[in-house]
Image (cartoon, rainbow, N blue to C red):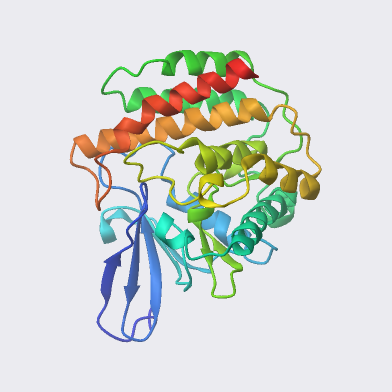
Amino acid sequence: MPGMVTGELTGELVQGGRSNLTYIVGDGTREWVVRRPPLGHVLATAHDMSREHRMLTALADTSVPVPRTELLCQDEEVLGAPFYVMEYMRGTVFRTAEQTATLGEQQRQDLSFQLMDVLADLHSIDPASVGLAEFGRPEGFLERQVRRWTKQLKASHSREIEGIDELSQRLAASVPTSGRVGIVHGDYRLDNVIVGDDQRIKAVLDWEMATIGDPLTDLGLLAVYWEGFSGLENNPIAKGVGPEHGFPSAKQLFARYAERSELDLSDVDWYLAFGYFKIAVILEGIHYRFIHDQTVGEGFEHVGGLVAPLVAQGLATLKEA
């Protein structure tokens, strides 16, 4: 984009992400965000920059707040990998217990319910109305999701994990019938949104796993981030959220979502169990990259220890259901 840069560029890695790499790049006058895939061992379809860029661009004029996209570059000779550039939005990303401790009780509730309202708004959008009719294949979506994450697990195999094969098999054998088709974020949680000084959500980030399918997969995954890591030591993934930190319970979040979306949540336990499985596979992939020295940043050394407890909770959720 000739004329875009007016001075010498500087770059800073944004800490906290565990997958795609995010940098703040500036020229002394303006700042942008650059996103690119992780270094080495990139699982097929898991880090597609063009998909993330397309989703952000499609949602630009909807009720879902997203950063404005500037440029997509798929020429790997520039940075060594495809990347895209988007606007830099100032605000707070609540990633730690120290950060969420600064919020009052009412602020915690308001922010939690905002999170659900934005998710319900996302799921209410007709994909075809924003040019995403061909973005995914909703038929057989849940079956393919279980197969896909089972395949991703095998691609990152470096050790035996008790119960993970059983969880995969049980999920595949009990897939519910999907309801409404919608846009699925794929990794929706509090630390994937930017919150402004007015405590309003300014932008939803990290759309790398977005697709068209069953919206309730987002709900199950969010609940795992919200309560599934409670009590787990050395947890760098989900901090400062959930009832133990003064936030509403996952059940209260479900109720808020149900009021706004009118979707049937009777099979939500399956989606919760699938959320446990999906996060376990993602973390196992991160663990694989860490032990092969293919990660950038800090906080990866304890990720591998979280996988087995998440698998156990997924199995327990299915058995309770």
Q: In x, y percent, where is residue 149?
A: 47, 28
Who is closer to the viewer here, 92 or 123? Answer: 92
The image quadrant of residue 24 is bottom left
Q: Is residue 86 left or right of residue 43?
A: right
- The residue at the point 26 percent across, 54 percent down is 80
Task: Please say if 85 is above or below 171.
Answer: below
Q: In x, y percent, where is residue 121?
A: 72, 54
How many marks on residues?
0
Who is closer to the viewer here, 305 or 19? Answer: 305
Q: In x, y percent, where is residue 180?
A: 76, 37
The reply to whether residue 1 is in sight is no
Q: Is residue 125 left or right of residue 35?
A: right
Q: In x, y percent, where is residue 197?
A: 54, 75
Task: Please say if 47 is above or below 22.
Answer: above
Task: Please say if 195 is above or below 179.
Answer: below
Work out which quarter of the rendered image holds the N terminus and state it: bottom left
- The residue at the point 71 percent across, 26 percent down is 267
Q: Which residue reaches farthest left?
A: 293
- The residue at the point 38 percent across, 55 percent down is 74
The reply to whether residue 155 is in sight is yes
Q: Is residue 108 left or right of residue 239?
A: right
- The residue at the point 44 percent across, 28 percent down is 310
Q: Is residue 70 left or right of residue 218?
A: left
The image quadrant of residue 251 is top right
Work out which quarter of the rendered image holds the C terminus and state it: top right
The image quadrant of residue 135 is top right
